Amino acid sequence: MQIHGAHGYLVSQFLSPLHNQRTDQWGGSLENRMRFVLEIYQGMRKTLGNDFPISIKLNSADFQKGGFTEEESMQVVKTLAESGMDLIEISGGTYEAPEMTGVTRKKSTIEREAYFTEYCEKVRSLTKTPIMLTGGFRTLAGMESALEKKSCHLIGLGRALALNPNFPNELLNGENTVSGVKQLTTGIKAVDKLFPLEITWYTHQIHRIGEGKKPDPEASVIASVFHTIVSIGLHGLKRVRAK
């Protein structure tokens, strides 16, 4: 079972000094801000027992000014590891600063594929708890390189599975498979900036799989935006900013 503590969801909001403006025991210092996730974990452990595997998806940082920093993230990793967390999955960003989608990538990041490799290499020296690295992996060579260099213990995949659910099996069979994940665009800069394309388009692919259909890598990006607007309304697609 995994706690989602990244990408601006509730646990991530408690950890972020930008979003968490509380003045009681749940806000202010990092110790207070991480109290929420610790109590969630401790409650799960008490209910599920010591042998039940529990993990957390955690931001390396949220990449927002005044937000959750890399240094704070490392302290949270240490605290959770010491509390008995079985696995820590590393990601980063929020839907306002979507680093987890690879929107801003340095040349070195492109070469190594994974977005948060440097952070994982730092945090591995702080704990013996297994670390999963997710975000950016597209090839078997890239994944094997990360494991051989001990950047992480496990590889996490997301959008690659929405395009090819059999991707892990092909990799494990040694096939030279390359994920078809690529940067999405409607061809209209204003629309690209306004709407979270990586959410709408890949959600459409997941719905196809759920309906027993095959993913459609050539599906129209702008059509997925309109389909989502019809489904949840324009307001549901707007990025929500911290005030």
Image (spheres, rainbow, N blue to C red):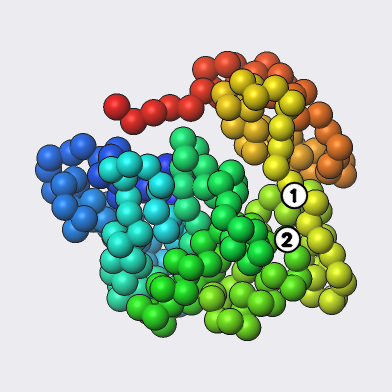
Task: Provide the residue designation for mark 1.
Answer: 181
Image coords of residue 85 (percent x, y): 39, 71
Q: If you read the primary sequence from the N terminus, does the residue marked by circle 2 or circle 1 appear first?
A: 2
Helix, strand or loop at label 1? It is loop
Compared across the picture, whether 117 is left or right of 230 comes to: left
| Contact check, label 2 and label 1, Cβ < 8 Å | yes
How many numbered discs sit on the rendered protein? 2
Compared across the picture, whether 210 is left or right of 153 comes to: right
Image coords of residue 107 (percent x, y): 61, 58
Q: Quadrant of residue 233?
A: top right
The residue located at (79%, 43%) in the rendering is 209
Q: Quadrant of residue 83?
A: bottom left
Task: Provide the residue designation for mark 2.
Answer: 138
Asked if 15 appears above or below 52 in the picture, the reply is: above
The residue located at (71%, 32%) in the rendering is 185
Helix, strand or loop at label 2? It is loop
Q: Nearer the viewer, residue 161 or 191?
A: 191
Separation of marks 2 and 1 at Cα, in angstroms: 7 Å
Compared across the picture, whether 243 is left or right of 104 comes to: left
The residue located at (56%, 46%) in the rendering is 104
